Amino acid sequence: MKFTKMHGCGNDYIYIDCFKETVTNESELAVKLSDRHFGIGGDGIILIKKGVKADFEMVMYNADGSRAEMCGNAIRCVAKYVFDNGYTNETSFSIESMGAVKYIDVTVEDGKVVSARVDMGAPILRSSDVPVNSDKDKVINEKIKCADREFNMTCVSMGNPHAVMFIDEHPIDFDLNYYGAKFECNTDVFPNRVNAEFAKVIDRKNIEMRVYERGTGETLACGTGTCATVVAAILNGYVDNDVTVHLIGGDLQIQWSGNENDSVFMTGPATYVFTGEI
């Protein structure tokens, strides 16, 4: 079976072209291939298929074998793969993941995609839809105790659940693995577990962020988490409507009007690492 390793701002997955390859035991394969010591190594696997509701479909599994709804970094890489490999010659097309359709515009240089702008859809804020257990319709800047520390939390779904915490220290100095793991697995609050973002607002146009992803742990970037963080920052009045988010793996540009019915737009790179065969 042939594969392609790709990353978006360091959020790396193993991509399998299911136009050419047949994959069985997808969840087990994700665990095996994602192992960074005994496998190829990655944050999970992405299966690229022909779409039913869209032009293409991506089927995503986390490194622990759990199915994931959406990944903003992975969808840009899928867009690059299908264009660069000649499955489409259009610069605007659609990709679905677990039934949710996203619309992508790619930027092409010398016949290859260098970046993609993704319409990530409108944010989901209703607590029951995120989901987060709360007696409030929306969780915006609500206090939550985690171990020895109290955070102010805003919850957003971008097709998958996110809990965003704004902190005073720079995220690089924050104990992400300790607090992130506790947030992810707190099923009393987050019945489907959660992706936890810890962010610092630098100014009205810049945010620093680290993310602890559900089913994977820390990743160098998270597209949906970046979108959720900017939505949370706008809802709390911290930033303007066009924000650069600085992640360990690189920068993503996020735009949102602040209207709950409007889409969030994410722009960022997609990069090949290597190809191989197992």
Image (cartoon, rainbow, N blue to C red):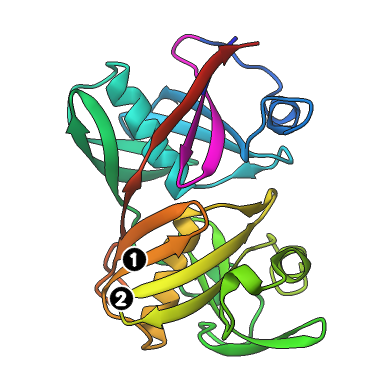
Q: Callout 2: helix, strand or loop?
A: loop
In the picture provided, is 241 more to the left or to the right than 278? left
Give the magenta range.
5-20
Residue at the (72%, 33%) spot, across then down = 36
Q: Does residue 140 appear left or right of residue 172 in this picture? A: left
Location of residue 152 in the rendering, given as x and y in whole percent from the top left corner: 60, 87
- Which quadrant of the structure image shows residue 135? bottom right
Residue 221 numbered mark, or none? none
Check disc 1 and report the residue beneath it.
244
Residue annotated with mark 2:
205
Q: Which residue occupies the foreground of this view, 236 or 250?
A: 250
The C terminus - image quarter: top right
The answer to whether residue 164 shows anywhere in this view is no
Percent position of residue 258, x then y: 29, 77
Residue 233's x, y, as percent?
41, 79
Q: Are marks 2 and 1 in contact (CB under 8 Å)?
A: yes
